[in-house]
């Protein structure tokens, strides 16, 4: 059975535009923050070392669909799930809510890469330990 990881976040003044509405670009930062919180929760990170190998997960795709404006001081709920686990990539899903109302939803796809100082990142198979850590959040209808 899949789980959903959730964080709450208060909108800061600096994230709003002159109309007092959160600027659309901030949703991408919110998604990244929620992803990082999930990975910390499972003892991993977007930069980590597994089996002596330094790896990271650069973004290769990100999208967001907006439904409701949010404003300074609103407290939003951001829910994270894992939509897909590929051999080298992971797609996370995000759902934003304010007082139970859908605000936005989005996805971020990342690729597992080996990093060595001074060298170009190389995509590698995602380590099983990382997959095992995030699998509880894999959507049951994913496939």
Image (cartoon, rainbow, N blue to C red):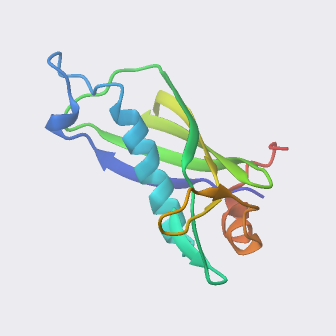
Quadrant in the picture for the N terminus: bottom right
Looking at the picture, how far across and down is residue 121, in whole percent?
Answer: 58, 57
Looking at the picture, how far across and down is residue 79, in whole percent?
Answer: 52, 46
Residue sitting at the far bottom: 52
Left or right for 88, reference 102: right
Residue sitting at the far right: 143
The residue at the point 57 percent across, 71 percent down is 42
Quadrant for residue 30, please give it: top left
Quadrant for residue 132, please give it: bottom right
Looking at the picture, how far across and down is residue 109, in whole percent?
Answer: 62, 42
Q: Can residue 99 be seen in this view?
A: no
The residue at the point 44 percent across, 35 percent down is 97
The residue at the point 46 percent across, 19 percent down is 67
Residue sitting at the far front: 118
Looking at the picture, how far across and down is residue 125, in whole percent?
Answer: 76, 62
Quadrant in the picture for the C terminus: top right
Residue sitting at the far top: 19
Q: Can residue 2 be seen in this view?
A: yes
Left or right for 2, reference 101: right
* In front of the other: 65 or 76: 65
Is 65 drawn above or below residue 99 in the view shown?
above
Is 54 drawn above or below residue 20 in the view shown?
below
Left or right for 87, reference 81: right
* In front of the other: 27 or 75: 27
């Amino acid at each position: 059975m899949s789980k959903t990881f959730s964080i709450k976040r208060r909108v800061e003044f600096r994230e709003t535009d002159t109309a007092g509405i959160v600027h659309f670009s901030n949703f991408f930062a919110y998604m990244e923050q929620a992803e990082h919180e999930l990975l910390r929760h499972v003892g991993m990170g977007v930069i980590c070392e597994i089996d002596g190998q330094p790896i990271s997960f650069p973004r290769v795709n990100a999208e967001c669909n907006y439904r409701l404006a949010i404003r300074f001081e609103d407290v939003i709920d951001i829910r994270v799930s894992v939509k897909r686990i590929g051999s080298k990539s992971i797609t996370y899903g995000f759902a934003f809510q304010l007082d139970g109302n859908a605000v936005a939803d989005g996805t971020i796809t990342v690729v597992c890469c080996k990093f060595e100082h001074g060298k170009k990142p190389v995509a590698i198979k995602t380590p099983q330990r990382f997959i095992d850590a995030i699998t509880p959040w894999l959507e049951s209808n994913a496939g």
